[in-house]
Image (spheres, helix red, strand yellow):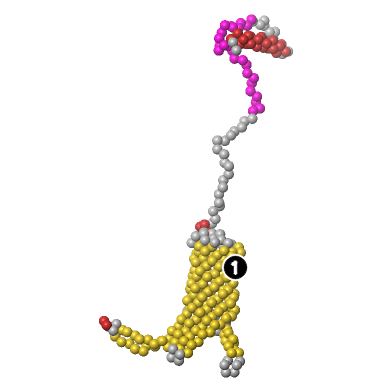
Amino acid sequence: MNATFVRTCALAALLAATPVASARAGDAPDAAPAADPQPTTLDLSAPPAMMPPASTPAPSLELLHVIVPDEQLLGVHYRPRRGGWGRHLDAESVSQIHLGFFDPEGAPGSEFLLGIRGGPMLSPNVQLGVGLDWSHIVDNTSSVSQQSTGPNGTTITVQQDLSRASTNLFPIMAFLQVSGDDDMSIIPYFGIAGGYEVMNLSADNYQTNQSFDATYGGWGWQAWAGAALPLSGRVRVTGEAFVNTAEPGRDVTSAVDGLTYRETVKANGAGARIGLAWGF
């Protein structure tokens, strides 16, 4: 585009705007008579950079103002933290191994106890499962037959075993256990169980060379109450006291009269167990 064409277009635009301005001034009813227009001088020799800029339309007031933030939050993903020091079991099944003692009624001593139980969690506070315990005790009767003095004054004692007896009890039971909420720092619980108990009694009399061995069985039940201390999300230390009630028996046929008799042994007593429970 050359300079002559630009100058011609600018002159045409200026002449076209002059009548419009005059018409608008004449439309006003009270407007004073317009003075004679002065001739407008347009310097066509001015360079294009010095010419007045073409008028641009006023910007519209109806503008859509869109603010685009520099940063966008697409979402916050988090896992809510639970109470109780975050030590929730969150398991579908829980197992426990424990040891302790069982003190039968009328027995001269307590029996060592070892056991395990486990099963699914019906709800966060209720568990249903199966347990097995083994309580064992050995009782030896002996007499001192001779004592002597060995080298350096050591006393040497010679004992003679007169008899030996052992008891083994195996309760096999289904249980229902209810515990407190996981939010508690120490979680109480209690349970009841019922099932079949097997007892084996054996004895040897070394003086008469007589031996006895018999196995008894019968239904029984247990109840316990205890507390659990959470160590982590899936492990707890447990401690509980329990009672056991059972009367296992067996049928014996007499060699004298041929009649059948029912022998029973009471396995009632109480005890305590400590253990470790974990979930998976």
> The C terminus lies in which quarter of the figure?
bottom right
Residue at 59 percent across and 33 percent down: it is: 67
> The N terminus lies in which quarter of the figure?
top right
Judge left or right: residue 185 versus residue 251.
left
Relative image position of residue 239 (x, y in whole percent): 50, 69
In the rendered view, tell whether residue 9 sits above or below residue 265: above
Majority secondary structure of magenta residues: loop
Q: Nearer the viewer, residue 174 or 82?
A: 174
| Quadrant in which residue 188 is drawn | bottom right
Specify whether residue 14 is in view.
no
Q: Residue furthest bottom?
A: 256
| Quadrant in which residue 21 is drawn | top right
Give the magenta part as a residue range: 39-63
- Category of crowding for the residue at label 1, using alpha-carbon neighbours closer than 10 angstroms: few (below 14), some (14–19), many (at least 20): many
Relative image position of residue 202 (x, y in whole percent): 49, 84
Q: Residue furthest left?
A: 152
Q: Nearer the viewer, residue 75 or 152?
A: 152
**Residue hosting label 1:** 128
Specify whether residue 253 is in view.
yes
Relative image position of residue 55 (x, y in whole percent): 62, 16
Amino acid carrying label 1: it is Leu
